[in-house]
Image (cartoon, rainbow, N blue to C red):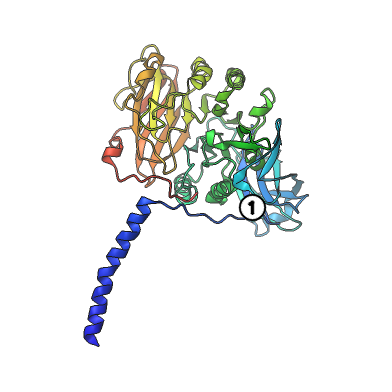
Amino acid sequence: MKNFLITLIASTFLLIPTLFITKVVRAAQSPVKAITPHIRASSWPDRIIVTPTPTPASSFSVTWRTDKTVKNTHGQIVKASPNARYDVNAKEFSAKTYRTSPDKGINSQGQFSYPSNTGLPIVSYHSLTFYNLQADTNYNYRVEGASGKWSPWQQIKTAPTNTEQDFEFLYFGDAQNGIYSHWPLMLRHAWQHAPKAKFAVYAGDLVNEGASDQQWSNWLNAGQFIHRSLPAVLVAGNHEYDWQMQENKQKNWALSTLWQDQFTLPLSPSLPKALQETAYVTHYPDLDVFVLDSEAQGNIALLQAQATWLDRKLQNSSAKWRIVTLHHPIFSSCGMPLGTAGQDEPDVRAAFLPIMLKHNVDLVLQGHDHAYSRGSIGTEKDLAIAASSTSLKQVKSVFVTTVAGPKTYPVKPTRWDEYRDYGVTLERIGENTPTYQIVKKSNQQLSYQAFMGDGTLYDAFTLTKNKAEGKTIIVANDLPPERMFNNTGLYKTHYDLAE
């Protein structure tokens, strides 16, 4: 019996590595993407997300979902207090409610469908903007589904109005892939690093398929209470657009209807209907954030409409710091498909770059490339000089592109060489390196830090404005070596990641 047990144990241990190796090889040869749980709507509120208004010191918007049975619902708000029953003096407001079918809709060409949502039931979305709030003040709020079915109380702090007050915000490039498996960790790590951030900029491609209700479910669930307390400045990328399948078998490329269903974003009355809630501005103390829809590149008229709008808004802006965010980079770093000259967007650059330089936009935050890049355009005095840690460079604008998700691309061999006529210098790149960013505003400075997923600093610079030197940039000392595919860990394709 003893010999039998020894033989059995030995055989088992010999077998285990074989089974393990076989499993790994099979996974590498044919990755299987897990189908994640798809949380269906109920009479209780879910997918709650806060978004800014043009005046975040005195208002904020919140959007949520229920099943179609909920037709009239409410939100409550009260100033935060230490009392056990802080809720007794809450004020109640009626929400706007609209029912929608995730799997179909109507456009100018007739009825269309979204195949990825086939069979999903009609749901209700609700939105409410809380107005007349005090600046720099904590408020508790909650939202309702069916009568009496309230969400837990959430807390949010309105923006300050004091231009001398320092604050910070988060910025993310594309999540897009691994929304269920990888993105939650990056988002939560960033929030833990900057828990007092006033808002977060998401520079497009939040999901991979803009019409996929399941992917949006995973993106919204990744944030949970973060989305309920940290206003989301949302940028529409090309993956927020999707194919609408017409009844006549034709296809129409358009912004997913889920965008405006799920998010309540500032309106821009002077812009066409096609740009509502994708091109807008929000004003923080001495810092204005302008959001553009660069996926409208297929329509030159829409790009020009945004350029005219941006020109006028920048002209009227009195903020010391002006930030523009859009999905497609003004200067592209990557080749897509791999090995090509790049995924350059000349129409986007032609429409927006002259306006940015005319008004000396301080910082341009972008996505799309799935690699890290930072560069700047100097003044005439420092036009061909690269920003460094040893000397100040006088600049007009700084351009940053980042990725937050696990899909990463190689930087193209030419890098930014083809853009030298614009006077731009490429000063930092990175491959195989998702990051999150913290941008801090003070009276005289705008400080930028990019952190890798383990919390290690990857890039940092400071913009300073004063009468003596104008606007200058200096890069942090002791940054780690640039990370490339040939000096970092193994990169595996993203196709097996749960979205």
In the image, what residue occupies the spot 46% across and 35% down?
A: 439
Q: Is residue 386 above or below residue 149?
A: above
Residue at the (33%, 18%) spot, across then down: 385
Residue sitting at 71 percent across and 54 percent down?
145
Determine the secondary structure under disc 1: strand
Residue found at the very far top of the displayed protein? 380
- Which percent across, then down, holds residue 230? 56, 44
Give the image quarter of residue 16: bottom left
Residue type, numbered disc 1: Asp
Extreme residue toward the left, this view: 3
Q: Residues within 10 Å of mark 1 (few under 14, many from 20)?
A: many
Q: Dividing the image into 4 quarters, which one contains the N terminus?
A: bottom left
Q: Residue at x 29, y 25 (%)?
A: 390
Position of residue 133 relative to residue 382, above or below, is below
Q: How many marks?
A: 1
Q: Position of residue 148 (x, y in %)?
A: 74, 58
- In the rendered image, the vertical position of residue 30 relative to residue 359, given as above or below: below
Residue 27 in sight from this viewpoint: yes
Quadrant of the rendered structure where residue 288 is? Answer: top right
Q: Which residue is mark 1?
A: 46
Front-most of residues 56 and 231: 231
